[in-house]
Amino acid sequence: MDDQKAHILVCDDEIDVREMLQEYLNKRGYKVSAASGGGELRAIVSAQTVDAIIMDINMPKEDGLSILRSLRPENATPVIMLTAAGDVVDRIIGLEMGADDYLGKPVDLRELEARIKAVLRRSAINETASVATADNDGARFGDYTLDKKAAKLLALDGSEVQLTAMEYSLLKVFSDNKGRVLNRDQLLEQAHDRSWDPFDRSIDIRISRLRRKLETNPEKPEIIRTVRGIGYLYDPK
């Protein structure tokens, strides 16, 4: 997908913010829709294909976290949350609920565009992922199989387990590095995630989410194991 033909949905209760983001992204070649809250957002998502959502956390009627909770896990559209500068708690909760990225307010428009390109790139990897040999087509994660040709996580009954773009990217990185301990920097680099910042616990939070989906007992993980002081190890056995 050409980034600049992507459909971006901006959800913010402040009209000035919506208009600013809409004007900037339109000029950058994106198709942009705007919503003032959860009701308008859901109507747009139901009626049109949306490639990425930019959503404020702090909205008066229904906050962004509640809207995100209602979208996941059925809808895996990448979501970038806008948070108050330095509000680490909201960022952590948003990532735990399935947000793909976050950005502090006031928004730096150039940084926002870079974040949009990053989540669109990861989403495109999900849609087009394919591998050369049959041996690499799938990877087992406990009772689940990562189908890398279809870019899907499948349960034993064949049903699909919804993943965000970053969750899929992480599982693919683990499957490509079976039995190898990976630190957080390696995971961020190979999963095409953004650069670290002083807060960044995003890898730990996302792996915690994956464990809740994959592990029989997420508190005692056996598939994606923690190697204390180093990083994480994917052990399909």
Image: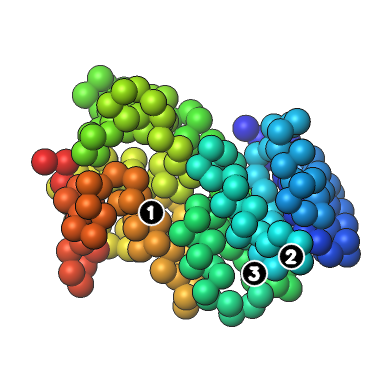
| Quadrant in the picture for residue 153 | top left
Which quadrant is the C terminus positioned in?
top left
- What amino acid is found at the position of numbered circle 1 in the picture? Arg
**Residue 60, placed above or below residue 113:** below
Q: Which is more toward the observer, 201 or 222?
A: 222
Name the mark nearer the viewer: 3 or 2. Answer: 2
What SS does tag 3 mark? strand
Disc 1 vs disc 3: Cβ atoms closer than 8 Å? no
Rounded to the nearest whole Å, what is the CA distance between mark 2 and mark 1? Answer: 25 Å
Disc 2 vs disc 1: Cβ atoms closer than 8 Å? no
Rounded to the nearest whole Å, what is the CA distance between mark 3 and mark 2? Answer: 11 Å
Which residue is denoted by mark 1 in the rendering? 209
Q: Along the polypeptide, which appears first: circle 2 or circle 1? A: 2
Which residue is denoted by mark 3 in the rendering? 83
Q: How many labels sit on residues? A: 3
- What amino acid is found at the position of numbered circle 2 in the picture? Met
What SS does tag 1 mark? helix
Seen at 41% across and 68% down, the residue is 201
Name the mark nearer the viewer: 1 or 3. Answer: 1
Q: Which of the numbered marks, if any, corresponds to residue 59?
A: 2
Which quadrant is the N terminus positioned in?
top right
What SS does tag 2 mark? loop
Seen at 57% across and 39% down, the residue is 75
